[in-house]
Amino acid sequence: MDMSRNKKNLFSRCWYYFRNGWSTYFAFVFAAVNTLVTTYYLAIDRYPTLKIIFPTFIDYVGIVSVIGIPILILVGYVHYKKTTAYKSEVDIIYESNPYVMRNLINSELILKLNLQLVEKMTKIMKNEKLTEDDVKELSKIENEILDFTKQRTFRNSKDLEFFKKMDR
C-alpha cells in the first residue's frame, strides 16, 4: 500500500478507528453500565418486592449477568447461524465495497483457471497429449479473464455483475 496515500488520509483513518473503537468497545461498556445503574436505581430500588430479589446493586449485576450473558450469546448465535440477517449484512458489504468484491472475484477467477490447469497437467503427467480442444479451452479462459480484467474498474459494476452471475 502506498504510504503517502495513508498520510494524506490520516484524518479519515483516525476518524474511522475512533468510530470503531467508540462503537465497538466504549459505547458497549458505557451502555451496559448505564442500563444496569438506571434500571436498578430507578426501578428496583424503589419497589420493596424487587428489593427482596435484588438486595444490592452488586447482587443485581451478578444475577443479570448470569442470566443475561448466556441469553445474549444465544441471540448472537441465532443472528449468525440461524437467520438470514447476517447473510444479508455480508451481501451488502460485498455489494457496496469494491475492494472486498474484487478479492472474491479474483479468487473465483484463480480457482477456475487453476482447475483447468490441473486438469491439463494431469493429462500431461499421464503422458497424454493435449488436444486442440484442450488448448482452445485454456485460451478461451485466458481471453475471458483478460477481457474481464480490462473492462472492470473499482468504479463500474463489472465485478458486481460477475458476482450476481456467480450467485445464481
Image (cartoon, rainbow, N blue to C red):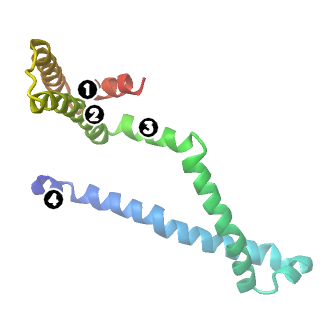
Mark 4–mark 3 Cα distance, whole angstroms, equals: 29 Å
Three-letter code for the amino acid on which mark 1 is drawn: Asn
Task: Provide the residue designation for mark 2.
Answer: 108
Q: Are marks 3 and 1 in contact (CB under 8 Å)?
A: no
Q: CA distance from mark 4 to mark 1?
A: 27 Å
Nearest the eye: 140 or 6: 140
User: Of callouts 4 and 3, which one flags the residue occurring earlier in the amino acid sequence?
Assistant: 4
At horizontal 63% and vertical 72% (from top left) the residue drawn is: 34
Q: Nearer the viewer, mark 2 or mark 4?
A: 2
- Foreground mark, 2 or 3, reads 2
- Assign a secondary structure to mark 1: loop
Residue corresponding to mark 4: 7
Position of 82 relative to 153 (above/below): below
Q: Provide the residue designation for mark 3.
A: 92
- Which residue is denoted by mark 1 in the rendering? 156
| Count of number-bearing discs | 4
In-front residue for pair 148/131: 131
Nearest to the eye among marks 2 and 1: give it. Answer: 2
Sequence-wise first label, 2 or 4: 4
**Which callout, 2 or 3, points at the residue further toward the start of the chain?**
3
Q: CA distance from mark 3 to mark 1?
A: 17 Å
On screen, 122 above or below 13?
above
What amino acid is labelled 4 in the image? Lys
